[in-house]
Each structure stands twice: as structure tokens, then as C-alpha cells.
Amino acid sequence: MRWRGTSEGPSMDYFTRRNAVILALVQVGLIVVGVLGAGAAYKWHATFTSFNSPIRTPDAVTLACDYGFLALTIPLGWIVVALTVLGHEDDEVGPRWLTFLSGLVVILVLLVGVYQAAVSPLLRLTCWGCGGLS
């Protein structure tokens, strides 16, 4: 990190409007991947359930398929707050750091959601030798 001076703390020159928009686009991409993956898992579960399989469609998959598009309000809200913080002309580093770190936390939470709604159910279905559809 580059230091501006002895009393001002670390520089936040890399957290620009462009980088905030990139962070928001990554968040939107994770939501899209999660909803599409949940749709694929739902289709696979529906196919195997039609053959009288005891496997039940996980609730996270159904929730992501039915209401996953509402998660797009999360990056929208975050980018509005981030651009508001970046729009202030004061050089305080604290709010910018908090905004940037909250964007990373949102990405981590979305990664956990994608894993629960898409990756885990698909792995359970395709893992034939480890307790899947055996």
C-alpha cells in the first residue's frame, strides 16, 4: 500500500468508481451462475424424481429457482451505497475501506449461496460411488 502521509493512513486510490462497478458485476455474475446452476439441479432432481427415486429436491434449489432473481437487488443496493461513498469529496479512508470490504463480504456470502443452491445438489446427484444415486 502507498502511504499519503503520516497521519492519513493507507491510500484508497485503487477503489475507484470503475473498480466498484467491477465488484458489482462480479456479484451479479455469481447470482446468475447460482440461479442457472440451481435450475440445472432442479431439472436433474425432477428427472430422477419422476422415476420414483427417493431423492427430494433440496429447499435451497427450489428457493433459488423461484426467487433467485430477487437477489439481484443485493448488488444494486451495494453499488448505490458504494457510489454514494465514492461521490463524497472528503478524503476519509474509513468509509471507503468499509465499503470495499463489504463488497468482498457480499461476494463471499454469494459464493456460499451458490455452493448451497447449485454446486452441492449437483455434486450429490453426480457422485455415483459416494452415496449419490446408487
Image: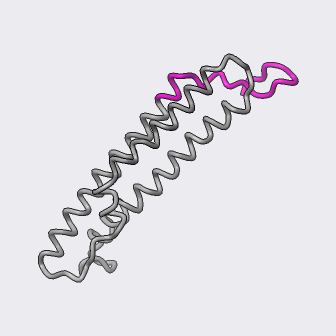
Residue range (magenta): 1-21
Where does residue 134 sit, x and y in percent of width and height? 24, 82
Outermost residue, right side: 6
Q: Residue at x 46, y 50 (%)?
A: 110
Res 84 → quadrant:
top right
Q: Residue at x 51, y 31 (%)?
A: 80
Side (left or right) of 47 relative to 68: left
Side (left or right) of 22 relative to 67: right
Q: Residue at x 46, y 35 (%)?
A: 24
94 lies above or below 68: above
Res 72 → quadrant:
top left
Colouring used for the render = one colour
Outermost residue, top side: 89
31 lies above or below 92: below
Circle count: 0
Q: Residue at x 27, y 76 (%)?
A: 56
Q: Main secondary structure of the magenta part?
A: loop
| Placement of the N terminus among the 4 image quadrants | top right
Side (left or right) of 48 relative to 126: left
Is residue 2 located in the magenta-colored stretch of the structure?
yes
* Residue closer to the observer: 5 or 25: 25
Res 37 → quadrant:
bottom left
5 lies above or below 30: above
Where does residue 13 sit, x and y in percent of width and height? 65, 21
* Residue closer to the observer: 74 or 42: 74
